[in-house]
Amino acid sequence: MKIDMKKSKPILFVDFDGTICHDRYWRSLPHSYHGKVQTLLFGTDTKRVNDWMRGRYTAEEINQLVAKTMDFPYEELWELFVNDCESMEVSVDTLERLSALRDRYTVILITGNMDSFSRFTAPALNLDKYFDYISNSYYEGKHKTDNDGEIFTEYATKYGVPLNECFVIDDSKNVCATFEQLGGTAYFISLDADVNHYLGLLEAEK
């Protein structure tokens, strides 16, 4: 069946980490341990964490590695990790504003993330109530910038809408640049413009 693009709503892609949420995994660890985790996974060598975000590791495997490296009890670390995942803070007002835009947009939460996001964070925050779809790189097997933004093209095709009518809100300059190269409009999160600033612009459009 051919989709009539004139009747299809444009897509609003919204990032999670650094855009609508600023909490970190393992943030409840004592400061000295938290720093070691950040260095181990998010320091100069990020291959392991990027592989995790592409579905090549599970949260259990990563936590086992972290526990062994830091000589920290695995069971204690795992419980802390899950609790931190489930207690991430996202403004309900922001979520409700995003949901209200679904009258005019297909609103997709698109996140470069881990299995833990879909297993623990999204259910705990009831995120599926506020978005038409949630896309997680862990299950997509790719990041937003992979293959020149292939994931955005796939969703535009799926929903039958041209990308030049679509928007992305993201804190990554690379993602925003990739999206603009595809013809879409990118809203970059910065100190001068947070997600609510851009939601105001979208709400004002008629």
Image: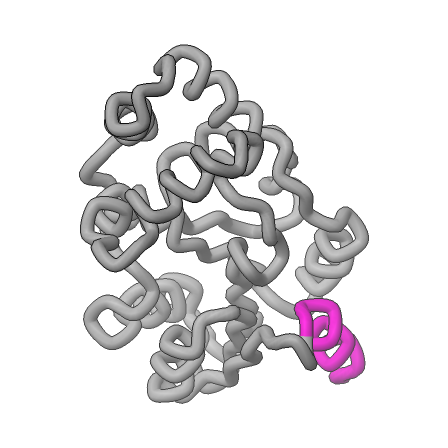
Total marks in image: 0
Locate residue 165, reporting x and y percent: 51, 83
Q: Main secondary structure of the magenta part?
A: helix
Locate residue 124, reporting x and y percent: 61, 29
Indicate whether residue 94 is drawn in magenta.
no
17 to 37, vertically: above or below: below
- Taking the spot 51% from the left edge, 77% from the top edge, the residue there is 166
94 to 65, vertically: above or below: below
- Quadrant that contains the C terminus: bottom right
Nearer to the camera, 165 or 188: 188
200 to 20, vertically: above or below: below
Indicate whether residue 198 is drawn in magenta.
yes
Locate residue 188, reporting x and y percent: 55, 78
Residue 8, can we see it? no
Residue range in magenta is 194-206
Residue 136, can we see it? yes
Locate residue 189, reporting x and y percent: 58, 74
